[in-house]
């Protein structure tokens, strides 16, 4: 079909193929982005709900000046290095 539209001109065919490919890839990229964002959101919600994750409580427990939790995590990290 593209060859007929190009009038059997190879350069015109290459240009039309490039346009067709680019437009198809733009549509596929948009579809992929929407689908992956939906999957990531679902996984994040699942992890938060099942893990009972409270990021505010985690930050508060780690940000204290003399936080024993922070100190124990830091010591464990140093032992792994």
Image (tube, helix red, strand yellow):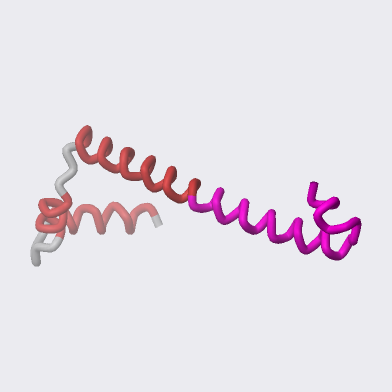
Q: Position of residue 57 (x, y in %)?
A: 10, 51
User: Dividing the picture into quarters, in which one does residue 8 lie?
Assistant: bottom right
The number of discs equals: 0
Q: Main secondary structure of the magenta part?
A: helix
Identity of the residue drawn at 9% across and 66% down: 65
Residue at point 53%, 52% (across, down)? 29
Is residue 48 found left or right of 5 in the rendered image?
Answer: left
Nearest to the observer: residue 10 or residue 54: 10
Residue at image coords 40%, 57% = 81
Q: Is residue 23 left or right of residue 3?
A: left
* Residue 25 located within the stretch drawn in magenta: yes
Front one among 37 and 67 = 37
Is 27 placed left or right of 69 in the picture? right
Residues in magenta, as a range: 1-30
Residue placed at 20% from the left, 36% from the top? 49
Which residue is nearer to you in this view: 65 or 53?
53
Q: Position of residue 48 (x, y in %)?
A: 22, 40
- Which residue appears farthest toward the top when viewing the image? 50
Horizontal side of residue 44 vs 52, given as left or right:
right
Give residue 80's position: percent from left, percent from top: 38, 52
Using the image, determine if residue 38 lies above or below residue 12: above
- Residue 19 painted magenta: yes
Q: Position of residue 76 (x, y in %)?
A: 29, 52
User: Which quadrant would residue 53 be assigned to in this image?
Assistant: top left
Tell me which corner region of the image, top left, top right, bottom left or bottom right, holds residue 18. bottom right
């Amino acid at each position: 079909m593209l060859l007929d539209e190009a009038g059997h001109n190879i350069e015109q065919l290459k240009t039309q193929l490039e346009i067709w490919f680019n437009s198809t890839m733009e549509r596929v990229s948009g579809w992929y982005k929407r689908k992956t964002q939906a999957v990531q959101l679902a996984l994040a919600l699942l992890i938060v709900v099942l893990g009972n994750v409270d990021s505010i409580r985690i930050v508060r427990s780690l940000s204290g000046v003399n936080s024993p939790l922070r100190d124990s995590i830091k010591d464990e990290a140093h032992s792994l290095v």
